[in-house]
Image (tube, rainbow, N blue to C red):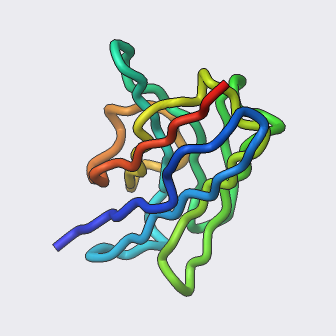
Amino acid sequence: EVQLVESGGGLVQAGGSLRLSCAASGFTFDDYAIGWFRQAPGKEREGVSCISSSDGSTYYADSVKGRFTISSDNAKNTVYLQMNSLKPEDTAVYYCAATPRGLTPELYEYDYWGQGTQVTVSS
């Protein structure tokens, strides 16, 4: 059974930091790219960052470049999203997802999704 389990969300003040984790199981981790997406109330889900488990290549949305860092621990089948200098507009439910189709920020390319973790940034 494929599982993606996010953790690490919470409430933080603007300028603060959080680290999200995505623990994956049930598929060959090295064959997949893992992406982080977020959805704020009343908005569409959007791609934030993704990483290729095979070669470590990464992608970041312009809105998070320089503030967020994605990394992968292949021994633990876990991907992390370090979020620094958080802003109120980063408030959203954050989801991780997995795709066998390579590094891509496109939602429709992802086959497996986690349940999400809430990140709230207060001003």
Q: x, y (%) of residue 29?
A: 43, 73
Residue at 46% of width from left, 26% of height from top?
46
In this picture, residue 27 sits left or right of residue 6: left
- Answer with the quarter of the image where residue 32 lies: bottom left
Point 51% across, 72% down: residue: 78
Q: Is residue 89 left or right of residue 37?
A: right
Query: Quadrant of residue 53 in the image?
Result: bottom right
In the rendered image of this protein, does residue 45 appear above or below residue 20? Answer: above
Of residues 94 and 2, the one drawn nearer to the viewer in this rendering: 94
Residue furthest out toward the top: 42
Q: Residue at x 60, y 41 (%)?
A: 49
Judge whether 61 appears above or below 6 on screen.
above
> Residue 122, how many percent across, how many down?
61, 30
Between 80 and 14, the residue placed more toward the observer is 14
* Residue visible at 35% across and 38% down in the picture: 109
Which residue reaches farthest bottom? 75
Nearer to the camera, 85 or 112 = 85
Residue 12, position in %: x, y?
Answer: 62, 43
